[in-house]
Image (cartoon, rainbow, N blue to C red):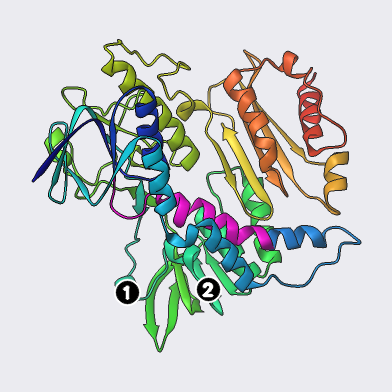
Amino acid sequence: MADNGYDVVVIGGGPVGENVAARAVRGGLTAALVESERFGGECSYWACMPSKALLRPGIALAAAHRLPGVPAGDRVDPAAVFARRDSFTSHWDDAGQVSWAEGAGIVAVRGVGRITGEREVTVGDQVLRARHAVVVCTGSVPRTPDIPGIADVRTWGSREATSASEVPGRLAVLGGGVVGVEMAQAFAKLGSRVDLIITGERPLPRYPEFAGDLVAEGLRADGVQVHVNTGAERVSEKDGVIRIELTGGGEVLADEFLVATGRRPATDGLGLAVAGLRDGDALAVDDSGLASGVDGGWLYAAGDVTGRAPLTHQGKYQARVVGDVIAARAKGERIEPEPWSAYATTADHTAVPQVVFTDPEVASVGLTGAEDGEPHRVVDLDIAVAGSSLHADGYEGKVRMVVDTEREVILGVTFAGPDVAELLHAATIAVVGEVPLKRLWHAVPAYPTISEIWLRLLEEYGL
């Protein structure tokens, strides 16, 4: 076996692993980046980028229809949409990502990495030894529900949905989370007849009710049949037709069946027993990314694999911290992850932003509602300002602001409405910076923009 030594060995070459390795190299260390599939990871080829590429054309067409005098057709061109999606995934070729890694001074190692000893990762016939740290950035994999018959039926996961090159005549989607609603709407706008099956009264159950209700209205406006308070009791397939029997009665027939019921950390077969941990579990970490319960301080993790804030941008944030921490500790610095310092992922706990790229969009950061026993106040308003009226005829949206009434700072904001994603970073800054409301009052929103809603929120609060 070849024996190679590096300061840091990173398992998982997606955006999180890339950022860990890049920051470590920037800090003066050497780094090997191990990837079993494509460098660039899930987000580049099967998640964030292709899903948004599939959604955007249909949403742009809908936006044109909301304005008089804008010539627009009735339907997008699926072939053109798929071709544009393919360009964003580099046609599933990771040569550019490998070139980037090598240009950044990172050694790219292709293959399945397994921890085989303290500070040791084996990839095929190579043994990679880490002088300072091994970092796990293996992301997450789909969670398969236990439904009778599902093992015998052709199903889509998120990968199959985002990489599809044909529009199914009938698509059934199980799950009302982010993947479920985004792909249901994307394929409805591309021309599929879509049935969305959800267990609750509305999609997006982790968001305020108004957000789920507005998204459900948007889905129905695109022809999606939303089956609420139900689930898949049993599934079967005959002559290429998939039959989903619904809980409580009824059935859905589909040509393709997307199972979007969540994800779990990808730690199967990783060799965590070497570190006293168990494969299949999330890797618990402190705010510096150091794995909990591992002697010697050599194992770190970042991204979905930790179970904390499973979002690409949040994983990259964790990665930047982890890379800097390892580089500092390698120099002998004593690092304590003090909140909001360069060596702590404090935002994971208080200020995680997320956008659901449906029509209408949902954008949220921090708390989504008041917590029992806390001095919080919730301010709910319709987004009804001059900017929204000009943005689209019949603009319909809502916003919620959660305020700590003792400190008079914002703890969370949720927007729901067309094109609200671009409002989110201002809210994130307000939450992270703990900007006092009396100071925020002096941040005058430009007229006429949808950002005028900030003035209305502060006025409603009493300023």
| Foreground of the two, 19 or 285 | 19
**Where residue 110 sits: x, y (%)?**
27, 50
Q: Looking at the image, which residue is at 40% across and 54% down?
A: 94
Q: Residue at x 16, y 24 (%)?
A: 295
Q: Residue furthest left?
A: 1
Q: Position of residue 459 (x, y in %)?
A: 81, 24
Report the residue marked by disc 2: 171
- Residue topped by disc 1: 149
Which secondary structure, mark 1? loop
Q: Is residue 67 left or right of residue 379?
A: right
Q: Residue at x 53, y 63 (%)?
A: 86
Q: Looking at the picture, how far across and down is residue 63, in whole percent?
A: 77, 57
Q: Which residues, given as a range, are shown in magenta?
A: 34-57
Report x, y in % for residue 427: 65, 30
Number of numbered markers: 2
Along the viewing direction, whichever of 252 and 290 lies nearer the viewer: 290
Q: Residues within 10 Å of mark 2 (few under 14, many from 20)?
A: many
User: Is label 1 or label 2 in front?
Assistant: 2
Q: Image height check: is 187 above or below 268?
A: below
Label 1 – label 2 distance at C-alpha: 18 Å
Q: Is residue 41 magenta?
A: yes
Looking at the rendering, which quadrant does residue 379 occupy? Answer: top right
